[in-house]
Structure formats: C-alpha cells, structure tokens
Image (cartoon, rainbow, N blue to C red):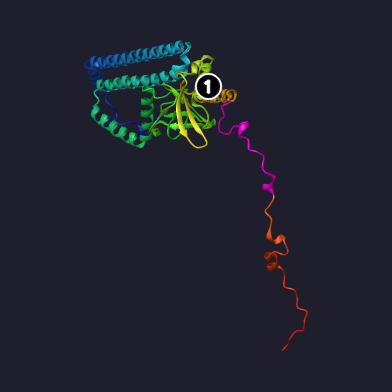
Amino acid sequence: MPWPAALLPLAADTPDATTTLKETHESVTEAASFIEENWATWLSIGLRILLIVVIAAALRSVVRKALTKLINRMNTSAEAVEGTALGGLLVNAERRRQRSEAIGSVLRSVASFLILGTAALMVLAALKIDLAPLLASAGVAGVAIGFGARNLVTDFLSGVFMIMEDQYGVGDKIDAGVASGEVIEVGLRVTKLRGDNGEIWYVRNGEIKRIGNLSQGWATAGVDVHVKPTESLTRIREVVQEVADTLAKESPWDERLWGPVEVLGLDEVLLASMTVKVSAKTMPGKQFAVERELRWRIKEAFDAAGIRIIGGPPAAEEDEEAADPATAVAAPSALANPASPQSLATAPIPPQTGPRITK
C-alpha cells in the first residue's frame, strides 16, 4: 500500500549519516583525551584518599586498643589491691573501675574525634575543596550550639574534671551542697547519690559548687560523757582508758580505730553536771559506729565502777528523807473559831424583831 506524500520524510529532514558519525567520533575522541589527560591525577587523588582513610582507621584502632589495655591494667591493679587488708579501705575496686571506664571513654572519644576529623579535612583538601568557608560555618555553628547547650557543656566539663581529679568515687559519702549521701554512680553529666533515708538523688555535675568528701583520709569519733560534778576526774580517766584499751584489742574495732582513744579533758563544767570529752581517730565513715560502741562500753564501765552519769539513778545516800507528816496538814484558820473577830466579822446580820417605823 503506497504511503501518502504528506507522511513521507523530506530529503532535508533526513540526518546526514556522515555528519552524525563525525560528531560522535569527535565526542568520543574528546572524552578519551580528557580521561587520558586526567586519569593520572584522578588515580593520584584516589590513592591519596584511600591512604588517608587507611592510616586514620589503623591509627584510631591502635589508639583505642592502647587505651583499652591501659584501662584494663588499671582495673587489674585495683582488683589486686582490693584483696589486701587495706584494699577495701583505701581503694574501692568499683570506684576505680567506673573512674577508669569514664576516663577511657572520654579519651577514646577525643582520640576518635581528632583522628577522624583530621582525616576528613585532609580528604576535602585532596579533593581541592576550599576549607575556609566550611571552617567558618563550622565555627559559627559550634558557637551557636555551645551557647544553646551551655548547661550540657558545663555538666560535661565539670564531670570530666571531677573524674580526672578523683574528687569522689563510688562508695564515697559526700556532701554536694544540693544533696548529700553515698555515691552509687559517677557519670560525665550526672552523679547519682543515695541519701540516708534510701532516696536516690540525681545531681548535675555543673550544679555542684562545692564537694565535701567524708570518706577520704580519716574521721573523728567524739563522745561527750556527762557526769556529776562530784565525781573524781582521775577515776573517770582511768575507767575510760581501760575501756579504750579493751576496745582497741578486739575485732573489728582494732581496724576501725586509727589512733588511741584520748580523754581530751573537761569540755564544760556546770553546777549540776560536767562534760568529759573523749575522741578517737577512725576509719572514714566508721566514726558513728565507734561512737555508739564507746558510749555503750563507757556506760557499762561507769555502772560497774559506781560513777554516776547525768540522768542515772540517784545514790542511796542522796535519797531524800521522808517528808514530815505535819507538812501535809494545813495551818489552822482563824475562821474555825466562832468567837474570833474574823468569824464575827463574817457572820450574817440577824434580822430585827422590834417595831418598825414607817413613814
């Protein structure tokens, strides 16, 4: 079937096969020339980027393994000290473990950030990317983020310095101002405390302005003994010294006492009592137990020695004499006698029986 003339392509509309082939050849030739001229540069850039990535990854892995090995060695040394006599006293394994883990985490994060950040900048430099606008934008963004999250940054930095300086650790009893109690967890942002009544306090590290660590060094146990002012001070000192010598030889008080129990002397003298001050240097956190034990033993020793304390039962010779029965009888009253002037003055006026005068 013959096609209509309108549908037949015109000669001018038919592409020239020779021209098309020529243009294609020129494009391929230009592409090949461009690749031939730049393949060495591309290969150099690719190898440089690959080398940067491999070195960064290897360096990061070596640094992290070295830090992990260091942390494990610290934990091992803490566990070795924990088994000694003073291990639980001077070094707490859990405290050392958490502290070392926190320090290791911070060091690993800082090392990874520095290594990977430097590698990323080197890769961008290898790609001929201008880093000046990027660094300027990153600086502005960092300032904005730091200003918006200044509390978080403050908490984090405070936590880092507290851990690095070993201001407190797990098991320590501290007074943080806003709360006090035993440290059960130390974090980079929050410190967890358990109060005396069992409550748990979450204290932000940035909110801690002062820290009183009650578990470092040593503590002081102080006992005030209130006795009668008529008691012999020499006898009191002898009895207390006997109690102290006995206490220092018994377990577990021989480990909790770090010094001799001393009678410091009279702390207060009043008309009805006098106060004798007793003190001893103890293991941190054990002063209250030592104080209670000292009070218990001193009370028993005083009772056995006949030394009376304030509030105790009175001695037999000081018992009050029986009251005079006459003191319970009231004094005689003048009104009891009807003929007394007081009775006559209070007697009612008798009615008149004579004639009455009326107006």
Name the quarter where the N terminus is drawn: top left
What residue do we see at 30% from left, 34% from top? Answer: 143
Quarter holding the C terminus is bottom right
List x then y, in percent, for residue 93.
46, 16
Kindly identify the residue that appears in the image at 40 percent across and 34 percent down. 207
Asked if the magenta segment contains residue 13, the reply would be no
Q: Residues within 10 Å of mark 1 (few under 14, many from 20)?
A: some
- Is residue 131 rendered to the left or right of residue 62? left
Label 1, secondary structure: give it. helix
* The quadrant where residue 124 appears: top left
In the rendered image, the residue lying farthest to the front is 339
Along the viewing direction, whichever of 71 and 29 lies nearer the viewer: 71
Q: Is residue 8 visible?
A: yes
Residue 21 in sight: no
Residue 152 picture location, percent across and down: 38, 33
Query: Between residues 44 and 331, which one lies in front from this camera angle?
Result: 331
Residue type pointed to by label 1? Val
In the picture, residue 52 is in which quadrant? top left
Reply above or below: 337 against 270: below
**Span of residues in magenta:** 306-328
Q: Which residue is mark 1?
A: 239
Task: Locate residue 84, reporting x and y percent.
Answer: 47, 11
